[in-house]
Amino acid sequence: MAEPACAVRGIRGATTVEKNEAELIYVATQELLVEIIRNNNFSADDIAAALFSTTEDLNSAFPARAAREMGWHSVPLFCSQEIDVPGALGLCIRVLLLVNTTMRQDQVRHIYLRKAVNLRKL
């Protein structure tokens, strides 16, 4: 039987922090990335790109730095700010990883931690 074809899949995740502090952002981001990798069984070499966003109330650090500190030196990383929607979850870090994988779309596991677990209910 032939190997499944490799495709680029989007893997989403989000987490929150308690305060706008750089160290909290780095720790939460690394925790999120580790859980996404663990649940989807890939390595940094498989990542085509990582797109991070933070809510407007998080501006003390770039979440991408947390990925660099994990050794993601060759992965293209990008940070942006989320749209400031009234009533939306605050103190939130989101990520979209574009991953080269043989997983089917329905096998991808998106990971939401801390207060961000409520985002999957929407």
Image (cartoon, rainbow, N blue to C red):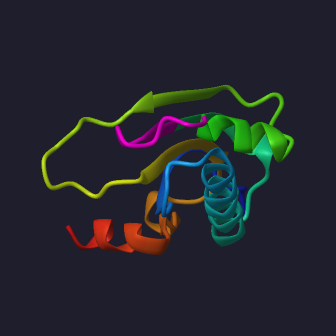
Which quadrant holds residue 90?
bottom left
Q: Main secondary structure of the magenta part?
A: loop
Horizontal and vertical percent position of residue 101: 65, 50
- Camera-nearest residue between 15 and 50: 15
Give the residue at x 78% y 45%: 44
- Camera-nearest residue between 74 and 17: 17
Magenta segment: 52-61
Give the residue at x 65% y 36%: 64
The answer to whether residue 71 shows anywhere in this view is yes
The answer to whether residue 6 shows anywhere in this view is no
Look at the image and say whether residue 56 sits in the magenta stretch: yes
Look at the image and say whether residue 60 sits in the magenta stretch: yes
Horizontal and vertical percent position of residue 22: 64, 45
Number of marks present in the image shown: 0
| Residue 51, above or below 87 | above
> Relative to residue 65, is residue 11 drawn left or right?
left
Horizontal and vertical percent position of residue 54: 43, 41
| Residue 79, above or below 91 | above
Horizontal and vertical percent position of residue 25: 60, 51
Give the residue at x 50% y 46%: 95
Quarter of the figure that contains the N terminus: bottom right
